[in-house]
Structures are given as C-alpha cells and as structure tokens.
Image (spheres, grey):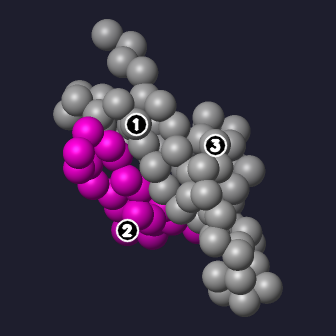
C-alpha cells in the first residue's frame, strides 16, 4: 500500500482523518476517487455531512474543488501557518 484514505463515521458525519496520495501519483484523480468513495459509503451509513481538516501548506484548494467549505481556522498552527476545518453537505443520489 502506498496511499489511501483513513476516516470514520460518527453522529451521522464522515470524518476524513487522513488522505495520502504519493506526489508522483497526484493529479490523476486518485484523491478525488478516494474522497467520493468515502462520501458514498458515508451516505449508505446515513450520514448527512462530511468534515476534515487540512493545513495551509496542504490541500485546501483540492477540497474546495470537491465542494468543501471552510468553517473554521486556527491561526499559527503550526506557527506561521493556519489549520483549516472544512465541511460538506452530503446528498444521497438514490
């Protein structure tokens, strides 16, 4: 295994704790596919929302392209950067 998604569902929400796609494989839709698969599984489990956090030097733009919006920011975490908390409403396609 060289990458993947780690998360869980709780209180009808999906929390994505970790998404890893090796740099050499980025831009090929792998991360998007992993997020969408996790969201679909969450919907099957009765979830209505998804949330995650990312750092300023990571992938905020990637998650925004997938429909996530920032609902909170922790400045200087780590010092000189921000940590962003993002959420998305999940909609069943059934």
| Horizontal side, residue 71 vs residue 51: left or right | right
Name which of mark 2 and mark 3 comes first in the sequence.
2
Q: Which residues are magenta?
A: 1-23
In space, the residues marked 2 and 3 are separated at their CA atoms by: 30 Å
Q: Residue 57 location in percent, x, y?
A: 74, 72
- The single residue placed furthest to the top in the displayed view is 94
Residue lying farthest bottom?
79
Q: Which one is in front, 69 or 63? A: 69
- Residue at horizontal 32 percent and vertical 43 percent from the top: 13
The nearer-to-camera label among 2 and 3 is: 3
Magenta run includes residue 76: no
For label 2, the residue is: 1
Residue under pointer 3: 69
Quadrant location of residue 65?
Answer: top right
| Between discs 3 and 1, the one toward the N terminus | 1
Image quarter where the C terminus lies is: top left
Question: Crowding near pointer 2: few (<14 within 10 Å), some, many (20+)?
Answer: few
Name the image quarter holding residue 93: top left
Q: Which mark is residue 49?
A: 1
Residue 33, image x and y in percent? Answer: 50, 40
């Amino acid at each position: 295994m060289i990458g993947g998604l780690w998360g869980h569902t709780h209180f009808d929400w999906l929390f994505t704790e970790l998404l890893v796609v090796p740099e050499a494989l980025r831009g090929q839709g792998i991360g998007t596919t992993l997020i969408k698969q996790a969201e679909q599984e969450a919907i099957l489990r009765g979830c209505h929302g998804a949330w995650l956090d990312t750092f300023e030097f990571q992938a905020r733009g990637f998650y925004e392209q997938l429909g996530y919006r920032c609902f909170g920011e922790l400045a200087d975490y780590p010092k000189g950067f921000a940590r962003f908390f993002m959420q998305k409403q999940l909609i069943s396609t059934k």
